[in-house]
Amino acid sequence: MQDVVDAYVWVGESFYPSLVDFVEETRRKGASRRVSPLLDLSKLTPGKSRMIFIHPKAYTESLMVPTQGCPKNLEKHGTEIPCIGAHWHYAAALGSITDPLGMGVIGDLSYALPEQIEAPADCRPGLFLALPITHIEFENDGNPLPKSVAKASEVGFDVVVLDQEKNHEM
């Protein structure tokens, strides 16, 4: 049995002060990450490999949601067991932009936030989201395609080469 290799992706705090901003943007627009053409994409497995996202303030041992518990209604989550849903309660304290009505704002999107509280002091890097890798897109700059892009196609990924004038699939 072959081990599945995942791609770990750092989500920068300068663009996404809180992981909530990234999650809310991804819910509406999907996730797309630019990677180095030197990355060996042939190590990824179509249908199994994932992008696993890391944020500099995703982990804390005190992820407790005030009063109502886990947003997914998982038993003991957010009350006795830490729950990442707590991040929505302190997105503003971590630097997420809010409008006068208390809505979170990222780019041209806005999203609902519950009552805001102070963020735990021990926030540090952690994993917060895993998504399937559905296809590989490569921005064609007129040079030959990197070997990594051709290898991704050979192992079974749908590879889309983006030209300035049109798109085509390999």
Image (cartoon, rainbow, N blue to C red):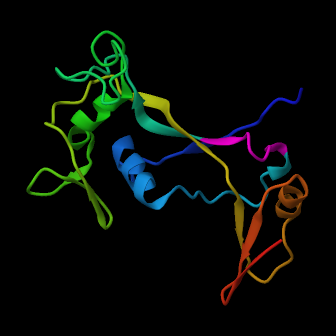
Residue 144: x %, y % from top left = 86, 76
Viewer can see residue 36? yes
- Seen from the viewer's position, the closer of residues 19 and 23 is 23
Q: Which of the 4 image quadrants contains residue 44?
A: top right
Q: Main secondary structure of the magenta part?
A: loop
Relative to 127, is 107 above or below? below
Q: Which of the 4 image quadrants contains residue 101?
A: bottom left
Q: Is residue 63 left or right of residue 29?
A: left
Magenta residue span = 43-51
Residue found 41% across the figure and 46% down from its top: 23
Residue found 54% across the figure and 44% down from its top: 10
Residue 16: x %, y % from top left = 38, 50
Relative to 55, is 66 above or below? above
Q: Which of the 4 image quadrants contains residue 119?
A: top left
Farthest residue in the left direction? 100
Residue found 46% across the figure and 39% down from its top: 55
Residue 93: x %, y % from top left = 21, 38
- Seen from the viewer's position, the closer of residues 32 and 1 is 1
Q: Is residue 35 left or right of residue 61?
A: right
Viewer can see residue 40? no
Relative to 71, is 16 above or below? below
Relative to 157, is 50 above or below? above
Is 151 contained in the magenta span? Answer: no
Residue found 22% across the figure and 48% down from its top: 112
